[in-house]
Amino acid sequence: MSDLATEILLGIATAVLAALILVPMFVVMKLLLDAGLVVLFAVVVSCGVLVAILLRHETTR
Amino acid sequence: MIDTDLLFIIFIVAVALTFDFFNGFHDAANSVATVVSTRVLSPGQAVVWAAFFNFVAAFGLGVHVANTIGKGVIETSVVDEKVILSALIGAIVWDVITWRLGLPTSSSHALIGGLVGAAMASSGTGVIISEGIEKTSAFIVISPFTGFIAAVLLSLATLRLYERIAPAMARSIFKRLQLVSAAAYSLGHGANDAQKTMGVIAVLLFTTGHLGSDFYVPLWVILSAHAAIALGTLLGGWRIVRTMGLKITKLEPKDGFAAEASSAAAILFATQVGIPVSTTHTIAGGIVGVGSTRRLSAVRWGVAINIVIAWVLTIPAAALIAAGAYAVADRF
């Protein structure tokens, strides 16, 4: 496969990957917002802190 | 002959559009910070690209945020020309101060602070709609956290996908993808930020009897607000671009793509649910997110903390300035 074709395929794969991550994430956020602002706030902040802790653990090993 | 009341309203609409222009000047350049810092586009090309998509956002993305600003922050019954003018003065003065200091604070929160301060100076605390303030305040925290989480996930996923791809090829792909992510970000920015000005103009027209019995946002207000923010993007904000794109963390094209795509999604989400968010906050969260996936020390936390302090100060500071402006305006 030529480099150009590989680039095009990888570009499409990356865009699809981004959609597969972002779309469900924001669907869940809408459901959480419907459940209440406090619920959304608590979940998002907890997840953010958890991700930061995990990254700190993984990147300082 | 045009009466003086109408002339005053036209003057305030002009001030609101000037605020929108400065919003573009102050905030919108964040849209292009990552594209410039990764050298995908030259600064000149990047601002034209961002401004175009700021304007295109006028079509098809609704007016939910404008409705929130117009009807959901302060009671419309207390809104008059002096309240709106004072709110705009509070927001503009705070924007100019933070621009001079090179701090990427939020024009959106400055405007909300201005509205709250002017309304409170006019009629006391009872006219504040707590639900609108609570939502906006909660999203001061939620939007950068969302940008951060989404950027981390996207960054890690693309890292895995490109594990066995030559760095030169990956760089070439992400340079092209960044054009799309920057466009999406500018679209979100235009949609969310221009609608704040639309909301202010629409509530002014509504309370002064120029809209009839129902609140809505006229087409000319939508188009002029988007044109003003796009023009602002074209003309300025490089001091802040440097802070956002280069000082927080060093970026590669794949990082820029992850930061922009995730921030764009976060802003478009907020726009669809009618919540005014800071595009600055959101992209900062995204940039911190991609920097953190390399190592937390890749993020220059000193700069990030200074930015957070300025954010926290924005609503009270703009409210104080607006209250002062109202006190002066009320003497006339």
Image (cartoon, rainbow, N blue to C red):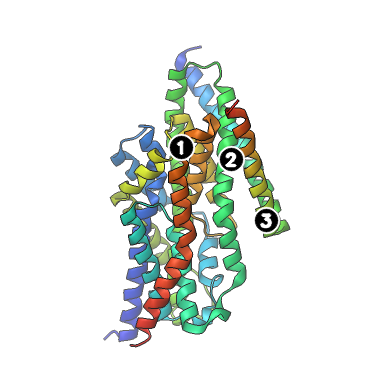
Which residue type does callout 3 highlight?
A: Leu
- Distance from the alpha carbon under mark 1 to that under mark 3: 28 Å
Which residue type does callout 2 highlight?
A: Ala
Residue at the (33%, 44%) spot, across then down: B47
Mark linked to residue B150: 2
Q: Is B122 on the left-hand or right-hand side of A33?
A: left
- Distance from the alpha carbon under mark 2 to that under mark 3: 17 Å
The kind of secondary structure element at disc 1 is: helix
Q: Is residue B246 visible?
A: yes
Numbered circles on residues, count: 3
Residue at the (57%, 34%) spot, across then down: B154
Where residue B290 sits in the image (x, y, percent)?
52, 35
- Nearest the camera: B6 or B289? B289
Residue indicated by mark 3 = A33
- Distance from the alpha carbon under mark 2 to that under mark 1: 17 Å
In the image, are marks 2 and 1 on the same chain? yes
Furthest residue toward left: B1
- Say which chain tag 3 marks: A
- Say which chain tag 1 marks: B
Instruction: Say which quarter of the image contains residue B243.
Output: top left
In the image, are marks 1 and 3 on the same chain? no
Between discs 2 and 1, the one toward the N terminus: 2
Q: Is B20 on the left-hand or right-hand side of B259?
A: left
Residue indicated by mark 1 = B180
Residue at the (56%, 42%) spot, across then down: B148
The kind of secondary structure element at disc 3 is: helix
The kind of secondary structure element at disc 2 is: helix
Quarter that holds the C terminus of chain B: bottom left
Which residue type does callout 1 highlight?
A: Val
Camera-side mark, 1 or 3: 3
